[in-house]
Amino acid sequence: MFNPDINDYQLTSIISECCGGIAVVYSAVHKPDNQTVAIKRYFVDKSKEKATLIQQDILTRRELQHPNILPYLTSFVHGQELYVVSPLMELGSCRDILDRYFQEGLPELACAIILRDVLLALQYLHIQFYVHRSVRASHVLLDTQGNVCLSGLRSAASMMVRGRRQKQLHSLPPPDHDNANLMWLSPELLEQNLKGYDEQSDIYSLGVLCCELANGAVPFAEVPTTLMFTEKVRGNRPQLLDCSSFPEPLDDGEMKSMYNTDSGVGDSAEGMCRVRLVYARRKLSDTFHRLTDSALHRDPDKRPSATQLLNHPFFKQIRRGDYLPGLIGRVKPIQPDQSDISALLLEEKLSDMDIEKTTEWDF
């Protein structure tokens, strides 16, 4: 049992800043049972306009329970700050792992395990009449036991309105701080027309996630928003990069034109060359290409459902003994940082100061 009391938790390390600077994620210890958890600390005075979204995230996570959806443990308010407690996913997000350890993309078997578990989460969400609307590597979290959890539910939308299931949704998901989420959104969602969109929009985002995990870079990352929108509406699909789609050698212009992005490894010429060689010399399975291509179909009615994709031949390569952390062995779990602890002690002293409570939260 996790109590909604700040005195029951000891912050141990800063993991990351998120949500455009209005929140910080920490690792912490739940003192009563010495269990390690993650705490997201929202600075409510900086995010009054996003208060409804934060509440929606908490309420949605309370309602949904699935092994592949990040669990909600508890939440509480202290001063003008909101704390949300979740299990600690020690390996961090897939985006962190790609940036730090696998700039050229994850091994195919690791991609298969992660994508299978994300599809299990989406299958559950869609059965519950939710559309996630923010499937991306930064919202896919891993722990040292091989568990994969989907987060980012503040963008989720229910298709149930006043007890009746709606056939389509029409609203855009809430914008993130830099509109980066647009790169994962489906063409029908971006079009904002009378046809609307449904849960098949998440399948398109899963196809973009396939490219992100396998290639290390996000499709359309370096393309102007208007061009990205045009390419998606025309039905141009991102590709998995291997010897069949990325012939050697290429210059920067050819590479950007083919994939609609850069290599994702910054400005280092040596690093870019190394990643290009990895793409040009590797061979991803035909089933991986087919799964990605089917998920990215322009017509949502022609995309397979999450349930259908779970039966795709691509996932037959997964064996019972396959262990995800072993496939990405170079990834180091989050560890307490002594320099963080000193800063956290100061933060705790400041947070203990009397602050007038101006925001009420009703969960």
Image (cartoon, rainbow, N blue to C red):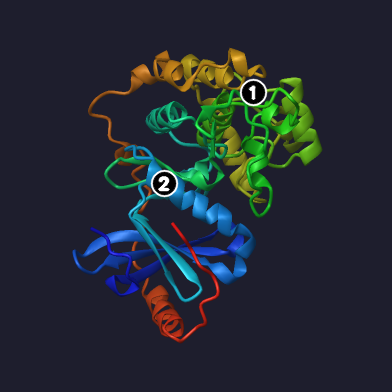
Q: Residue at x 47, y 28 (%)?
A: 126
**x and y, in percent, of residue 300 in the image:** 62, 19
Closer-to-camera residue (288/298) = 298
Q: Residue at x 57, y 31 (%)?
A: 205
Q: Please tell me the numbered disc located at residue 187.
A: none
Q: Residue at x 70, y 31 (%)?
A: 250
Q: Quadrant of residue 338?
A: bottom left
Q: Residue furthest front?
A: 162
The answer to whether residue 17 is left or right of residue 172 is left
Q: Could you tell me which secondary element the residue under label 1 belongs to?
A: loop
- Three-letter code, disc 1: Pro
| Image quadrant occupied by the C terminus | bottom left
Residue highlighted by disc 1: 247
| Image quadrant occupied by the N terminus | bottom left
**x and y, in percent, of residue 285 in the image:** 47, 18
Q: Residues within 10 Å of mark 2 (few under 14, many from 20)?
A: many
Q: Quadrant of residue 44?
A: bottom right
Q: Is residue 155 visible?
A: yes
Q: Is residue 101 visible?
A: no
Residue highlighted by disc 2: 61
Depicted 266 relative to depicted 252: above or below: below
Closer-to-camera residue (245/35) = 35
Depicted 141 relative to depicted 351: above or below: above
Q: Quadrant of residue 241?
A: top right
Mark closer to the chain start, 2 or 1: 2
- Three-letter code, disc 2: Arg
**x and y, in percent, of residue 140 in the image:** 45, 42
Q: Could you tell me which secondary element the residue under label 2 belongs to?
A: helix
